[in-house]
Amino acid sequence: MIISNEEVRELTAEIPEGHMHVRTTLVLQDGKEFTFQEATVASLVRAYVTVKTHPQLTRIRLSGRKLTTKKDGYAEWQLLEKKQKITESRCDEMARVSEMAGQE
């Protein structure tokens, strides 16, 4: 499922009464609602910022794992980065394609 901006009726981020963490609710034009806990949005933002700002990474994958040991204040279930190799950056790939086109 790919959700475009046009399909979003409303997005609300709030700390509900009696809670300590942010909840984010996405309401689609067809009325479907998705509510995300703070840790889920934090993982999404962390992955987005990593890919957007890293000079070489073009993909990151987080997978859910139950931790045997954890830091105080953190949940047992975490979305953590899977090990991966750095692939060619988009800029490097474009430069290589451009060089190849110039050789023809």
Image (cartoon, rainbow, N blue to C red):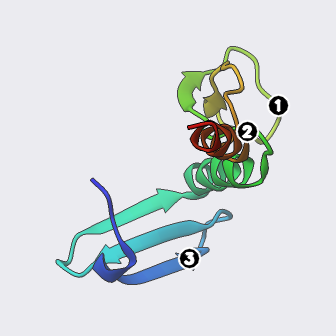
Q: Are marks 1 and 3 in contact (CB under 8 Å)?
A: no
Q: Nearer the viewer, mark 1 or mark 3?
A: 3
Q: Is residue 76 visible?
A: no
**Residue at the spot x=58%, y=33% of the render?**
62
Q: Helix, strand or loop at disc 3? A: strand
**Residue at the spot x=40%, y=72% of the render?**
26
**Count of picture labels:** 3
Q: Which residue is labeled 3 in the image?
A: 13
Q: Are marks 1 and 2 in contact (CB under 8 Å)?
A: yes
In primary-sequence order, the first of circles 2 and 3 is 3
Q: Amino acid at mark 2?
A: Tyr
Image quadrant in which you'd find residue 88: top right
Categorize mark 3 by other alpha carbons within 10 Å: few (<14), some (14-19), many (20+): some
Q: Which residue is labeled 2 in the image?
A: 74
Q: Give x and y (percent) for residue 78.
A: 62, 33
Taking depth in this image into account, of 84 and 25 the one nearest to the observer is: 84
Relative height, residue 91 to residue 15 (above, below)? above
Taking depth in this image into account, of 48 and 74 the one nearest to the observer is: 48
Per the rendering, the mark at residue 71 is: 1
Taking depth in this image into account, of 2 and 17 the one nearest to the observer is: 2
What is the CA distance from the residue labelled 1 to the residue labelled 2? 6 Å
